[in-house]
Image (spheres, rainbow, N blue to C red):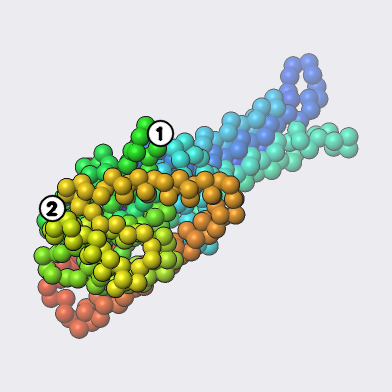
């Protein structure tokens, strides 16, 4: 199955049915009064959250959705039937944005949640409605109103409490596979993970949180290097970011340098995301003797001037992972409890998410525009002799590893 996290669609709700012009005509009743019924309302268009879905791929194949029109009114004061509502199923975590105004129409946050995309038009009035003491035989009716029409962008963000960031090969997927039931692909080459995936970390039967594994980032990602930054938006819902660095990578890169490289990319993608609560996790500690772990962690912390939470673990040997999961759970529970007790905090969080979404959109658009400009320049210079007409503008589609 392909993982598609953005789609443009057009919705046109159904038109209301016209009001009916009719007079009662029956045997032996010479002058029957008006009896034209109202038109039925046009069908509205909704989205509904469905937790069995995890991609917006269907919306790439069908882009136009037209609601059913209401039926016209009928004689004998019968109203026309209403147009049937249309319900489009979307994955939980889908945001709906009005393209024209760039405003958020809504966020689908749980299964079964319904959001109206376009309302069906009102039905017209039949001539019965216009009967009065001075006009007993009105010939007036009104037509049904057109339904609402909108161009919309659907954006899917995986919903996770904790998100992982780090260079390729840092051991992100290995950590997820150790602490959750998810079994992501793990390999000793960069960019093993191509699309975000989720795992549930179960502390006990009634305490759990969701962790998101996101493809690795490299220097220049904010300008599109590697897999770029388009998957970073999936971290905007996470309350805590785990920033993984390798203690002693094969390429000899210093963990401090690796950490800063990713911090820079995060800040270029969205300064607000870079400012979110982030925990430093030094991984692959098993590559050095255990009695040196604390010293290594201390050195990295001091050099980075890091005063946030910091851990040293071995995902492979499952050392330090349990305490990390437990601490994450405790911290999340305190965030949730605080938010419940102080509604203002929940509002702040919503504002923060909106800001991140805006910053992310701006940066992604800038990358897209730069690439388009580059391609246009290349064409101009007839450098496209080895054209691969690859529409590689960040709108890539990758195979979803189930
Ligand atoms: N020695 C050691 N190796 C590890 C540890 N964790 C992961 N690895 C190895 O590091 C390699 C990369 O691990 P992944 O989990 O695929 O890394 P990733 O960060 O998900 O990489 P990308 O998906 O490419 O971004 C694999 O060969 C793992 O077996 C660890 O704690 N110690
Ligand atoms: Mg991976």
Using the image, determine if residue 266 lies above or below residue 145: below
Residue 36 position within the rendered picture, expressed as x and y whole percent measured from the top left: 70, 31
Label 1 near label 2: C-beta < 8 Å? no
| Rendered position, 364 above or below 84 | below
Q: Position of residue 223 (x, y in %)?
A: 29, 72
Viewer-closest of 113 and 169: 169
Residue depicted at 68% across the width and 31% down the height: 37
Q: Nearer the viewer, residue 33 or 391?
A: 391
Which labelled disc corresponds to residue 52?
none
**Count of numbered circles in the view:** 2
The answer to whether 74 appears left or right of 197 in the picture is right
222 vs 47, left or right, is: left
On the image, the x and y values in percent for residue 251 come to 12, 68
Residue assigned mark 2:
187
Residue 315 seen in this snapshot = yes
**Quadrant containing the C terminus in the rendered view:** top left
Q: Quadrant of residue 203?
A: top left
Q: Which mark is residue 206?
A: 1
Whether ligand 1 has any atom under 8 Å from the Cβ at mark 1 is answered as: no
Does residue 399 appear anywhere in the picture?
A: no
Q: Earlier in the sequence, mark 2 or mark 1?
A: 2
Cβ(mark 2) to ligand 1 < 8 Å? yes
User: Which sits in the foreground, 70 or 364?
Assistant: 364
Label 1 SS: loop
């Amino acid at each position: 199955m392909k993982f598609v996290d953005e789609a443009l669609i057009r919705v046109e709700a159904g038109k209301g049915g016209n009001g009916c012009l009719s007079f009662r005509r029956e045997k032996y009743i010479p002058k029957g009064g008006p009896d034209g019924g109202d038109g039925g309302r046009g069908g509205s268009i909704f989205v509904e959250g469905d937790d069995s879905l995890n991609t917006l791929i269907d919306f790439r194949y069908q882009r136009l959705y037209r609601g059913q029109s209401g039926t016209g009114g009928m004689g004998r004061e019968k109203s026309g039937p209403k147009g049937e509502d249309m319900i489009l199923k979307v994955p939980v975590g889908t945001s709906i944005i009005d393209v024209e105004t760039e405003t958020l129409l809504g966020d689908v946050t749980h299964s079964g949640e319904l959001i109206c995309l376009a309302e069906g038009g009102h039905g017209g009035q039949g001539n019965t409605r216009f009967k009065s003491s001075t006009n007993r035989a009105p010939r007036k009716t009104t037509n049904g109103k057109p339904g609402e029409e909108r161009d919309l962008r659907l954006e899917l963000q995986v919903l996770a409490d904790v998100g992982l960031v780090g260079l390729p090969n840092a051991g992100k997927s290995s950590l997820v596979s150790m602490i959750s039931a998810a079994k992501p692909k793990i390999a000793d080459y960069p960019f093993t993970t191509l699309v975000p995936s989720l795992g549930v970390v179960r502390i006990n039967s009634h305490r759990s949180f969701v962790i998101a594994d996101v493809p690795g980032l490299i220097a220049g990602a904010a300008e599109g290097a590697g897999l770029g930054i388009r998957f970073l938006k999936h971290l905007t819902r996470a309350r805590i970011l785990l920033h993984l660095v390798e203690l002693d990578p094969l390429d000899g890169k210093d963990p401090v340098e690796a950490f800063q490289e990713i911090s820079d990319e995060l800040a270029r993608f969205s300064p607000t995301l870079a400012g979110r609560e982030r925990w430093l996790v030094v991984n692959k500690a098993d590559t050095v003797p255990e009695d040196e772990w604390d010293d290594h962690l201390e050195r990295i912390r001091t050099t980075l001037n890091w005063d946030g939470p910091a851990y040293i673990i071995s995902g492979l040997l499952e050392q330090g992972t349990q305490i990390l999961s437990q601490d994450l759970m405790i911290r999340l529970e305190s965030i949730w409890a605080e938010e419940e007790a102080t509604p203002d905090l929940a509002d702040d969080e919503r504002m923060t998410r909106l800001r991140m979404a805006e910053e992310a959109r701006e940066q992604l658009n800038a990358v897209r525009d730069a690439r388009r400009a580059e391609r246009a320049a290349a064409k101009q210079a007839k450098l496209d002799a080895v054209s691969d007409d690859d529409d590689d503008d960040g709108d890539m589609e990758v195979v979803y590893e189930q």
